[in-house]
Image (cartoon, rainbow, N blue to C red):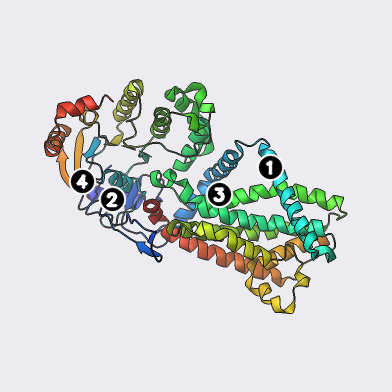
Amino acid sequence: MAKAAIDVKTVADDDEFRGTFHVYEPYRAGLPRNFSGYLKELWRRREFMNEMTRANVRANQLDTLFGRLWNVINPLLMGLVYLLLVLILARGATIPNYFVYLLAGLFIFDVLETSMSQGAKSVTSAGKMVTNTAFPKALLPLSAVRGALAELWPSLIVLVVAALVFGVRPQLTWLLTIPILVLLTVFCAGLAMLVATMQVYFRDTRSFLPYFMRLWFFASPVLWAADQLPKSGDFLRYLNPMFDFVATWSDAIVYGEWPNPQVWLVMSGWALVALILGGYVFLSRERDFAVRI
Amino acid sequence: MTYRTTFEKRPTLKDSLRRVGRGERVVREVEALKNVSFDLPRSRVLGIVGNNGAGKTTLVRAMSGILPPTEGRIEIRGRVSTLLALGVGFNTKLSGYENIMLGGLAVGYSRAEVEEKTDEIAEWTELGDFLDMPMTTYSSGMSARLAFAVAVHMEPDILIVDEALSTGDASFKAKAHEKMNSLLAEAHTMVLVSHALATVEELCTDAIWLEKGELKMYGPPGEVIEAYNASTGVDPAAVTTMQDF
């Protein structure tokens, strides 16, 4: 066994999934021992994540008549349904360019909603893959977030067309959508990992989630505008992480408004908190997943 | 390559989240493996036999790094490819080709590497046009062919196969044996969980008999199987004929 000891040293930087020397010792909870190795492996396997996303999209559209057209039909229908709802309730009529404003908010909120719902089932529905293969399981919820982003692109085309039709001209502030999306992606990734872990231990998560998301949706400035918020609702500005994401996004797209610089700090803060919380919960529990699926 | 599985148990198969009555949780601990310890040198073939629920699958999962042990230490030298419990089972709505890609990427190969191997895998499965069809249209034997082909073509140093050959037809079994023999010739190591005792006796150089999570015997396959058969009280001749099914 003396020789073995030497080997261990030379391959010490081997990570837990690849490489040729593995030592498995008891550790159910806690972060991966070789954290940077874990992240490296996560990055190295991003192809798998992409393929997983594509595979899920393809599988979902397999039996449908419209197939990929659903990427465009979905956002349009969603916009029309809410437009109808709001016209009946006749509240939003005071917001200029209401339809475009509504679409913008709907689409960005949908990124969060899809990340959460797909993320929640990402680990539990991977089933055999989790019980049969050793791989960084964080790829599963991350692939759900990637899927949510992939769904956004066709929606954005719808949005741009609608904007042009309703007389919103392209402007420099449209570029702000990129950093907003980057921060939102980080935020969603954190939450997706969190709900994925919750779902493994508590299968009721997915049943609660739609109602929770509805509530969150109404608490975010999608159907209403941020400046319509009554004084009594002011707490939403501080407690709802999506408030700034949605408001900044919609204002930048529809009204060409530059946000208050401190908004970036707030959004980065939320994104970081979500990522650290979700990442910690997921990575420290993931080795226990195989026995719970 | 050495496996040193020392004093390992798994009390984690918790039958959890079975919420009874007022949201109580039923948590049961199962000690799937107790005090199992052995070494397996390079280019040997280890057969694991035992009754249902003896801990065979838990043992190979622990060896593949899927389940960390609750106690003890497992050392693995070499790249492991696993083929556990019936089918890779990625996405049955996708075609065979897409599943090959997904399977290869999951194990950690790059897209280019998997593409390179795809033809070889496809040819080996002899599934032809079926590879373009969704896996829902496959029979269990066909899925087993695909899963086996993916696992063995990943150039593992150690191949772990858990009862994955049982649904195959005769020609597949013959092919699988041939492939495993050629892997062996290249000094690969294999671990085989099987209820087909004749297969274990024929292919393996070592055998382990697990009973209720404990290592009952470790030795040459002939002796281990004889002892195992004696303990179950089943006539070996009857078992042999059953294997033809």
Q: Position of residue A37 (x, y in %)?
A: 45, 54
Cα distance in 3D space between marks 4 and 2:
10 Å
* Nearest to the observer: residue A275 or residue B230: B230
Relative to B16, say whether A266 is above or below: below
Please identify the quadrant where the N terminus of chain B is shown: top left
Viewed as shown, does residue A63 lie left or right of A34?
right
- Mark toward the start of the polypeptide (4 vs 2): 4
For the residue carrying disc 1, how many other residues have a C-alpha within 10 Å: few (<14), some (14-19), or many (20+)? some
For the residue carrying disc 4, how many other residues have a C-alpha within 10 Å: few (<14), some (14-19), or many (20+)? some
Cα distance in 3D space between marks 3 and 4:
39 Å
Q: What count of labels does the image hold?
A: 4
Relative to B180, say whether B214 is above or below: below
Element carrying mark 3: helix
Nearer to us of marks 2 and 1 is 1
Element carrying mark 1: helix
Q: Position of residue B145 (x, y in %)?
A: 40, 28
Residue that numbered label 4 is attached to: B38
Viewed as shown, does residue A34 lie left or right of B72?
right
* Nearest to the observer: residue A78 or residue A56: A78
Q: Are marks 2 and 3 on the same chain?
A: no
Q: Position of residue B22 (x, y in %)?
A: 40, 66
Element carrying mark 2: strand
Query: Label 2 is placed on what type of residue?
Result: Ile
Label ID, residue A143: 3
Q: Residue at x 46, y 62 (%)?
A: A281
Residue that numbered label 2 is attached to: B74
Residue that numbered label 1 is attached to: A70
